[in-house]
Image: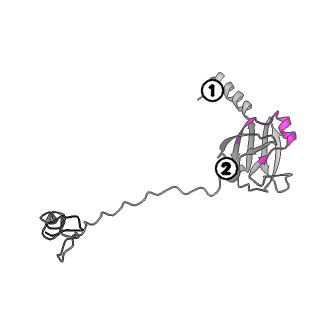
């Protein structure tokens, strides 16, 4: 009796030369093929060309605007890193704050008295917050216009009131 691997099994090895199943599994180009002509895959058709994409603008559109919502912390700071990045205002960048029609405006100004914080937070000055009736925890809507190098900070209650007025006047949509 022929044993294999000490398990007491006898007979031909499965998949070996004496196994009739070996012919089913081997064919041209496969492991059991001893022929001189390996089977080649049919050639792939060429890929279609990629579509032409529009060229990116060379400078930001003046009307392009990006929105975000933030909350004032107890020190008057707002996390607006994504918008500050879009504006190209890194930590230490000098800015100037103003108030126009109840909206806080921040503009890039090399002679500005305020800077973007080391952690990328926007610190709104206390007198500006007081004039706009903003306190710690208040929500603000931030609108960045990179083409104008401008960041607008709206109290969320003002935006809600404007939207409600538009809806009541039938101008929604």
Report the front residue among 153 and 122. Answer: 122
The picture quadrant where one finds residue 105 is top right
| Place of residue 129 in the rendered image (x, y in percent of width and height, measured from the top left) | 83, 38
Quadrant of the snapshot with the N terminus: bottom left
- 27 vs 159, left or right, is left
- 67 vs 53, left or right, is right
- Viewer-nearest of discs 2 and 1: 2
| Place of residue 9 in the rendered image (x, y in percent of width and height, measured from the top left) | 18, 64
Report the front residue among 57 and 113. Answer: 113
Residue picked out by circle 2: 82
In magenta, the rendered stretch is 122-142
Q: Residue at x 71, y 32 (%)?
A: 159
Mark sitting earlier along the chain (2/1): 2
Q: Residues within 10 Å of mark 1 (few under 14, many from 20)?
A: few
State the residue lying farthest toward the bottom: 36
Q: Residue at x 67, y 52 (%)?
A: 86
Of helix, strand and loop, which one carries label 2?
A: helix
The picture quadrant where one finds residue 136 is top right
Location of residue 110 with respect to 43 vertically, above or below: above
Q: Residue at x 77, y 55 (%)?
A: 118
Query: Per the image, is 104 magenta?
Result: no
| Place of residue 131 in the rendered image (x, y in percent of width and height, measured from the top left) | 85, 35
Q: Residues within 10 Å of mark 2 (few under 14, many from 20)?
A: some
Location of residue 81 with respect to 173 vertically, above or below: below
Report the front residue among 75 and 70. Answer: 75
Of helix, strand and loop, which one carries label 1?
A: loop
Residue picked out by circle 1: 171
Q: CA distance from mark 2 to mark 1?
A: 31 Å
């Amino acid at each position: 009796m022929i044993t294999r691997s000490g398990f007491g099994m006898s007979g031909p090895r499965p998949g070996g030369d004496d196994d009739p199943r070996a012919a089913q599994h081997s064919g041209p180009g496969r492991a059991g093929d001893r022929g001189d002509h390996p089977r080649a895959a049919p050639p792939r058709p060429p890929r279609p060309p990629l579509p032409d994409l529009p060229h990116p603008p060379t400078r930001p559109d003046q009307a392009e605007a990006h929105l975000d919502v933030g909350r004032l912390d107890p020190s008057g700071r707002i996390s607006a890193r994504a918008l500050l990045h879009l504006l190209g205002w890194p930590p230490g960048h000098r800015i100037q704050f103003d108030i126009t029609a109840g909206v806080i405006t921040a503009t890039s100004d090399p002679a500005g008295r305020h800077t973007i914080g080391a952690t990328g937070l926007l610190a709104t000055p206390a007198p500006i917050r007081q004039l706009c009736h903003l306190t710690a925890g208040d929500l603000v809507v931030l609108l960045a216009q990179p083409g104008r190098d401008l960041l607008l900070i709206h109290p969320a209650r003002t935006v809600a009131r404007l939207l409600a007025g538009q809806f009541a006047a039938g101008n929604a949509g």
